[in-house]
Image (cartoon, rainbow, N blue to C red):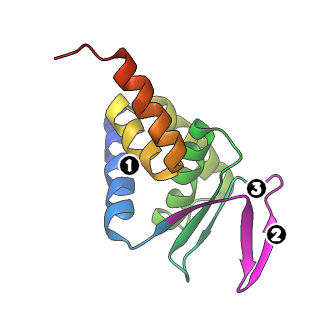
Amino acid sequence: MTKQATRYIFEKIKDALLHSGYEVVLSAKMVVAKGEYVRFREAKGYIAPDELRIYINKNIGINDRVITLVHELLHELYPSWRELRVENQSKQIFKHLTVSQLGFLQFFVMTKSEIDAALKRHQAHSPLC
């Protein structure tokens, strides 16, 4: 995948996150049907278009959460793509993200405590003004 192709798809993903109404929900449980939950096992995420929610397994690493978010949004953006293509493309997109693109996506899949810890680490390494 070229940088230009990654940039194009990233813009579509960004637009979907900002304007589609989808809420990203970090959970150790996955909704299967209204009112029913099951524990995430092998599943990393699930998109529920009727609810406008994307469920991401909060027990996986942050980078895996980013890949999963991209994966689920690719299902929404390209419904004709088969699972293998979505899986491969989400990993390729992840590999080609710029630092700012990665940071944008990480914001949606990090818990408040993870964001706070990352900000503290950044402050500890930033030069004083």
Give the alpha-carbon distance from disc 3 to disc 2, as whole Å: 11 Å
- The answer to whether 85 is drawn above or below residue 79 in the figure is above
> Could you say which disc has been placed on residue 43 in the image?
3
Categorize mark 3 by other alpha carbons within 10 Å: few (<14), some (14-19), many (20+): few
Find numbered disc 3 in the image and state the secondary structure of the residue it sits on.
Answer: loop
Which of pointers 3 and 2 lies earlier in the amino acid sequence? 2
Precedes in sequence: disc 3 or disc 1: 1
Q: Tell me where residue 29 sits by quadrant.
A: bottom right
Q: Position of residue 21 (x, y in %)?
A: 39, 73
- Which of discs 3 and 2 lies nearer the camera? The answer is 2
- Asked if the stretch drawn in magenta spans residue 6, the answer is no
Q: Is residue 37 magenta?
A: yes
User: Percent position (x, y) of residue 49?
Assistant: 54, 77
Amino acid under disc 3: Ala
Magenta stretch, main secondary structure class: strand
Q: Residue furthest bottom?
A: 34
Q: Residue at x 82, y 69 (%)?
A: 38
Q: Which residue does the image show at 57% across and 44% down from the upper left? A: 67
Under mark 2, the amino acid is Val
The residue under label 2 is: 38
| Viewer can see residue 111 | yes
How many angstroms separate mark 1 from mark 2 (CA)?
Answer: 32 Å
Q: Residues within 10 Å of mark 2 (few under 14, many from 20)?
A: few
On residue 9, which mark appears? Answer: 1
Q: Could you tell me which quadrant the N terminus lies in?
A: top left
Magenta range is 24-43
Mark 1 or 2: in front is 2
- Screen quadrant of the C terminus: top left
Q: Callout 1, which amino acid?
A: Ile
For mark 2, give the secondary structure: strand
SS class, disc 1: helix
Q: What's the residue at 45%, 70% (across, down)?
A: 22
